[in-house]
Image (cartoon, rainbow, N blue to C red):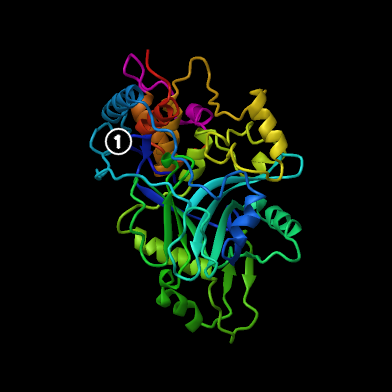
Amino acid sequence: MASKAASTVSKYGKLWGRGYESFPPKLRRILSVSGKGDHATTYLQGLVTSDLFSEPKAPREEDSESLRALEGLVSSSSSSLNVDGGSGGLEEPMEQEVPVQFTSKMRSTCFLDHRGRILTDALLWKRSLDGEPVNTANNDNAATTTEYLIDVPGDAADALLAHLKQHKLRRSKVTLKDRSDEFSIHAVYGTLNAEGAPPGYLAAMDPRHPSLGMRVLSVGPQAVSKDEGATKEETGRGDFAEDEVGNDRQSSSPSQPQTRPERELRQKTFETLMNNHFPPAPGTYRVLRTLSGIAEGSELATRTALECNLEFLNAISFSKGCYLGQELTARSQFTGVVRKRIVPVMVVGTEMEVLRPWVMASVIQEMGLEGGLDKILGDFGAGEDGEKGKTKLELGGYVPPPLPKISAAGAGGIVAMMMGSVPTT
């Protein structure tokens, strides 16, 4: 279930409620490009739309008028649109606001083909395999090994890996790997503090916009629980397990110990670490990016970078040198002609109350169909004469399809977040 919208507003606008989620390999994968000194940086510089030799820009902050209007919308929706009828259930823990840093440790980028059409977007992590601090500009130490971890949508990972191999020259001193089974990928919502990550983790605010959450990679040996790894290894039974696509498979031998995948162990360790501070909120990222009009992976295929708003997501540099597919992107930016763009659209009936279907879907998901219908009838079924206007049978055909769990105040917060950049009149 998706987490609800928070009741706090930062300088970047609306923040989502506290929660976390982990991404399975079919949603996010990790590809690795590593090399001594600046070899990896130079190799990727010619393939990505962002400038790896300069610091990324911070996302645009909201203007003061928009923030004041947004604070008013959040406070009013939190007090008057609670599903349970009260105002105390939507309060989120308040934390001291900290400066949000955007460095070359993680940046947003995009890969294009030779025609200038998008292969996929990606989040690019940079780290040193020798334990040295990550150099921020083009002064990578020749003695250190620099690795870029490419956080890419799962449906585009294979195509991107083939693309990277195709453009790797025989004499290139870089190593390409698919490390999706070794590392785990997570997102944390409702905070702007990405500093002080525990050993074994990389953490940074989403470089496209902080409202998309904090991204976390589990990469070090400290982030794997030894107890979790021993549990499965000690029980060498020929039991059935469920693979990533939901199919049952049987272990090859009843006497052969079965070790759990490293990514799964990392995910379990991260969940144990986070459960004391943040509730699980699977599905939140999809809700956030959909309502923000952010397409990913195969959704971007064959489109141009400007059609997908990547210049607004800090994924394009118009001042860097040549890179694959630059001509079409530069020409579109120079002429200023973009005939179509990806935008979020909410389709409702002319007389439909926007928030009510979200509330009803949330109640049904939380209480089940039977209990949810009883709750809906009690809250919404009474007419002007005090009698219930619809029976369960009549209402059964009207119940909207299940949606990600979200409160009415959260739905109002989403609209406010999308309109936060529009000055009030």
Q: Secondary structure at mark 1?
A: strand
> Which percent across, then down, holds residue 15?
37, 38
> Which percent across, then down, holds residue 83?
33, 33
The residue that appears at 50% across and 69% down in the rendered structure is 129
Q: Nearer the viewer, residue 238 or 198?
A: 198
Q: Residue furthest bottom?
A: 255
Q: Main secondary structure of the magenta part?
A: loop
The residue that appears at 52% across and 69% down in the rendered structure is 144
Q: Which residues are magenta?
A: 382-400
> Which percent across, then down, holds residue 410?
38, 34
Q: Is residue 406 visible?
A: yes
Badge 1: residue crowd in 10 Å (few <14, some 14–19, many ≥20) = many
Q: Does the magenta portion include 110?
A: no
- In the picture of the structure, the residue carrying the numbered disc 1 is 7
Number of numbered callouts drawn = 1
Q: Is residue 243 visible?
A: no
> Which percent across, then down, holds residue 155?
65, 51
Give the quadrant of residue 356: top left
